[in-house]
Every structure is written in structure tokens, then in C-alpha cells.
Image (cartoon, rainbow, N blue to C red):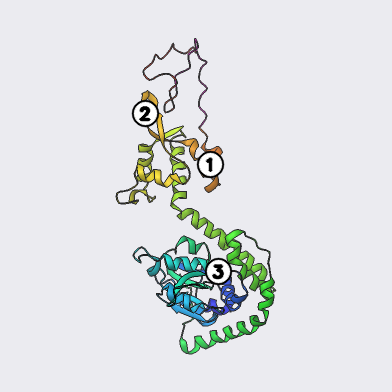
Amino acid sequence: MRSAVGKYVVLPSEEALTALTLWVAATHIQTALQYAPRLAVVSPTKGCGKSRVLDVVHETAHQPMITVNTSPAVIYRVIGKNPPTLLVDEADTIFGPKAGDKEDLRGLLNAGHQRNRPAWRISGPEHKPTPYPTFAMAALAGIGDLPDTIMDRAVVLRMQKRKTGEKVASFRLRYSVPELNALRDKLTAWLGPLRGQASRMVPPMPVEDRAADTWEPLVIIADLAGGRWPARARAACVAMTRHEAAQDEQSSLKTRLLRDIHRIFEANDNPEALSTQDLVAALVQDADAPWAEYGTKGLNAYHLGNLLRDFNISSANYRFEKGRQAKAYMRNRFVDARARNCPDLVEAATEPKQQAAPARPVQGKPPAAPAGSLPVGPPGGPAGPPRRL
């Protein structure tokens, strides 16, 4: 099966090839599983092999149901005790920015990741509340990332265009389909008698939480196969979940904002505060950041406040040198958010740079404040006697 998949498609890594092989095999025992991982086949542009992946899956998975568009009502009616494997091509047309409201479909796909999460609907002439099962394995292919809640429940294949020299076999119905169908039948014959054993397995997982739920069916298949497969599966699990964690961090707008603000504070020698106006200007001026195109006219103070609100960070009145007061963001308000969301940004790096030690106060008056910090005396007050050297 692994060789056949690699024959027809070029996947981004050996781990991705292993994952796709195990995912297809897991569809044949989904009635014994507690989780139904999604397979997200995404790419930045067309022509990267997404549809070919679905072609291969269609001929090897359990009872495939392929569509380029569908509705929740259809899926509710086809999922039963022995659900099909849902295959959705061009998923970006369903969930893309011009697709309209698809929350029902997204909710169905999210709920179907775990067993015993039915969708309740009113049905029949008596308007009787009726539970519809949602549990079914699903593969979705599209340009760009799918909604976060689906990606979080998926084994993600990030496809790219083939490089010069990367060759694949032509996919022809007359000989490719019989070859792949024969592999499908072998998977069915091998795994059918093992459903009971699979339902009792609780394999040790190298990851936790949602990632462990998603990858457990693939690791179960690997443990049933034995040999090199258990190690292969767990290595693929670790590598691909780490890659997605990095992708999430880089693509998360709010995490990106924390990182950019951290950089701006560092570029200004880590002052105690930066005015909202200066912070917004610095963010917008970064040509590599998304802030100049945020909203309709670029990031503004209102947008910044909204983005930071979830981190419990807000601006406050602050007095700068020469008595100037303005709305500003305090550097220490970002400490907790960075520790939780950007743990690689060591807080020690955000401490103010050491400055020359000020002279001792003379006649009880403090030394003049360094530029950019909070003045000690009242604005416009006496400067005090000169320092003794």
C-alpha cells in the first residue's frame, strides 16, 4: 500500500507517506475506533497533486463517498452504523471567504471526529427530535488551510508542486484502479477479523490531547502490522504534529502580533512603555507583516486593542519625558502572554539594557530621569542641583 501511494503521488515527506498509508488502512476499521481523524490535503496553489491523493484514497479506502460540494442534510443521511469514508475535493469552495455561511457543515465535521456526538434535528410530520450520527472518517482537499477547528482534528498533508526530476506513474483507470482495488480488498481481508482487537487497544502515544486522539487510529494500525510500522507511525506522528504546531504559531495572527510587538520593544531598547500611536506605526511600517493590509485601511489603535484583549492586555495613560501624556502599552503587560504563547521568547531578553548607574541623589532630590522613562518629579518642576562628579 505504501509503495502504491508513493507510485502515484509525491508527498512532502516520508512521514507524510507513512501517515497517508495508515490513514487509508484505518478507514477499514472505523467501526472499532473512538476517533475518526480528518485527512487535510492542502496546498498553496493548484497543480500540487491534491486531487490525485483523493483518487488514490477513493480506490483504497472503505466505502468512499466523493463529492466536490455537499450539504449537512446529505451527510446526516448517509452516515450510519457502518459509515462511508467522506472525500471532499475543492474544499476551499465550501469554506473559502466567498463560500458564505457553512457553520452547519463545519460543526458536523468537527463533531464527527469523535464517536457519540450526534446532531439533533426535527424530522418527520410529527416534528420529532431525532439524533443523526456524525462519526465518519473524512478527507478534505483544497487550496489554503481549512478552518482551524478542522485542521486541529486532521492529519495534515501540505502538498507542493513536483520538482524537476520527481516522477510519478500515470494514473489510468484501466490499470491503476484494479491495482488499487486489489490492495483495498487485501486491507479489508486483513483488518476485518481484527476489529475486536483494535477496539480494545490503547496504544502508548508520543503526543497528548487532541493530537493523540487524532493519531491513535493510525498508531493502532501500525501496532497491528508490527515490524517497523510502530516506530514509523510514532516518528511520523511526532514530526507532523510538531510541524503543524509551528505552522499554527506562524500563521496565528495574534501570536504573530505578540512576536512583532516583542521585536519593536527590543528595537527601542525595551522601554517601559510605547505609545499606542508609535506601536501602531511601527507595526504598519513592517513590509513583511500583514498589518498594513489589516482591515480596510490597515491596522489602527482600535484593531490593536481588539487583538490584544484576549491576552488581557490593554493600553493606559502614560506620562513620557517632558510631561507628554498619551495612551500607551506597558512592556510588562506582555510578559504572561508571551510566556504562554511564545515560550521560546525568553523573558530575560526583554529586560531593559543595563545603563550607566546614575549618580547618588544630592540634597534629597532624585537624579534626572533617563530619556523615555517616567519622570520622577512634576512636569516642569525644578531640575535640582547639578550632579557631583
Question: Could you tell me the amino acid type at mark 2?
Answer: Gln
Asked if residue 201 can be seen in this view, the reply is yes
Vertical relation: 108 (above or below) 2:
above
Main SS category, magenta section: loop
> Residue 325: which disc?
2
- From mark 2 to mark 3, how far is it between C-alphas? 54 Å
User: Circle 3 sits on which residue?
Assistant: 37
Residue 226 image offset from top left, x and y in percent: 69, 74
Vertical relation: 349 (above or below) 167:
above
- From mark 1 to mark 2, how far is it between C-alphas? 26 Å
Magenta residues span 353-369
Q: Earlier in the sequence, mark 1 or mark 2?
A: 2
- Mark 2, Cα crowd under 10 Å, few <14 / some 14-19 / many 20+, is few
Vertical relation: 314 (above or below) 41:
above
Instruction: Tally the numbered discs.
Output: 3
Question: Could you tell me the amino acid type at mark 1?
Answer: Asp
User: Circle 1 sits on which residue?
Assistant: 336
Question: Could you tell me the amino acid type at mark 3?
Answer: Pro
Residue 110 image offset from top left, x and y in percent: 50, 65
